[in-house]
Amino acid sequence: MSHSQVFSSHLPPPAPTMATATDSSRAIAAWLLACCAMLFVMVVVGGVTRLTHSGLSMVEWQPLVGAIPPLNDAEWQATFAKYQQTPEFKLRNFDMDVDGFKGIFWWEYFHRLLGRLIGVVYLVPYLYFLVRRKVHGPLAWKLGGIFLLGAAQGAMGWYMVASGLVDEPRVSHLRLTAHLGLAFLIFAAQFWVALDLLRPRQRCQAVTGGIARFSQGVALLVFLMVLSGGLVAGLRAGLAYNTFPLMHGHLVPPDMFVIDPWYANFIGNMATVQFDHRMIAWALALLIPALWWRVMRTAAAAPVRLAAHLLLAALVIQFTLGVATLLLVVPVALGAAHQGGALVLFCAALALAHESS
């Protein structure tokens, strides 16, 4: 054995190498992250639309023609006349005039316009990358699947609105929750694929394996919290029990199981859905600091540690927003910020799960 062979036998094994993202990968990732940013704006605007009771102002679903708003007084009067036939106008806004109608119309219009714009911003580059053979194989299928999810989201949005145009002047809380949950799933898919393209590397499972499983569980719990928040929003349960940390002096509200059968309370009882939302929030308030502490005690890479810091900061901000929103009886600005904060928290959890997996 030569001297060089003896010397090399005592060297530590090489660290896992990190593959560098290609120019095409970076371009695709930047496009996906731009779509994520637009989706974040969409979620916040959706929160404002819901909190200002603007979501039922557009009574037709016209994916193409509906992109053009009323342009003159005659068109405004015709659009307002359609709204006057809805339960919301007849039971709640019967004294509204055209000027008042415009105030709620523009929020819903802007929300739908954003949806159309996101569809165009997603579809056109996707087709370009396909034609130029920048995407192929599994990546092409993933991106195509995300587009189909986006199309399903548009249909789900109208399905939700349609539920409020029949008898009651409110949308189905279950459809609203599905609409919100699907938005978060689309965001997760885009964000995860973008991170895969930007950071294609081999990671040390001995160091990050346990953290990966922990962070994946936290991300799932954040998503469950979002779904519970959708039920709270849909039932307007945030307008009840506006005290913290107890619920009008109770740890467990006395009217949690007033609906029969008992399991229906978990999706239809204001007290129960708010209690569930609080409990998930408390669980995250315990688990995320524990996860952060575990990351800090390991030899995790710098991106993993940074993601843990961001997750902890997002938790503090979101928890504070949630308590403030509750105590102030859901003002529009705080309610919309709380909805957007949920997406930021979810994003941070996904980032940590990705970087440690």
Image (cartoon, helix red, strand yellow):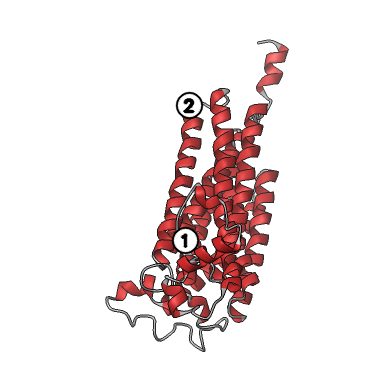
Marks 1 and 2: which is nearer the front? 2
Residue drawn where x is 45% and y is 55% of the image: 61
Locate residue 91, reporting x and y percent: 43, 79
Q: Which residue is mark 1?
A: 224
Secondary-structure class at tag 2: helix
Sequence order check: which comes first, mark 1 or mark 2? 2
Up/down of 246 relative to 208, above or below: below
| Depth check, front residue: 75 or 274 | 75
Residue drawn where x is 36% and y is 72% of the image: 167
Q: Is residue 269 visible?
A: yes
Q: Quadrant of the N terminus?
A: top right
Three-letter amino acid code of the residue under disc 1: Leu
In the figure, residue 196 lies in which quadrant? top right
Would residue 163 be found to the left or right of residue 316 on screen? left
Label drawn at residue 107: none
* C-alpha separation, residue under disc 1 versus residue under disc 2: 32 Å
Locate residue 23, reporting x and y percent: 67, 27
- Local packing at callout 2 (Cα closer than 10 Å; few below 14, some 14-19, many 20+) is few
| Depth check, front residue: 287 or 128 | 128
Locate residue 34, reporting x and y percent: 64, 44
Q: Is residue 204 visible?
A: no
Q: How many marks?
A: 2
Locate residue 224, reporting x and y percent: 47, 61
Q: Are marks 1 and 2 in contact (CB under 8 Å)?
A: no
Residue drawn where x is 45% and y is 39% of the image: 145
Looking at this view, name the residue that lies furthest to the bottom.
249
| Depth check, front residue: 290 or 165 | 165
Q: Which residue is mark 2?
A: 137
Three-letter amino acid code of the residue under disc 2: Gly
Up/down of 118 relative to 237, above or below: above
Q: Quadrant of the C terminus?
A: top right
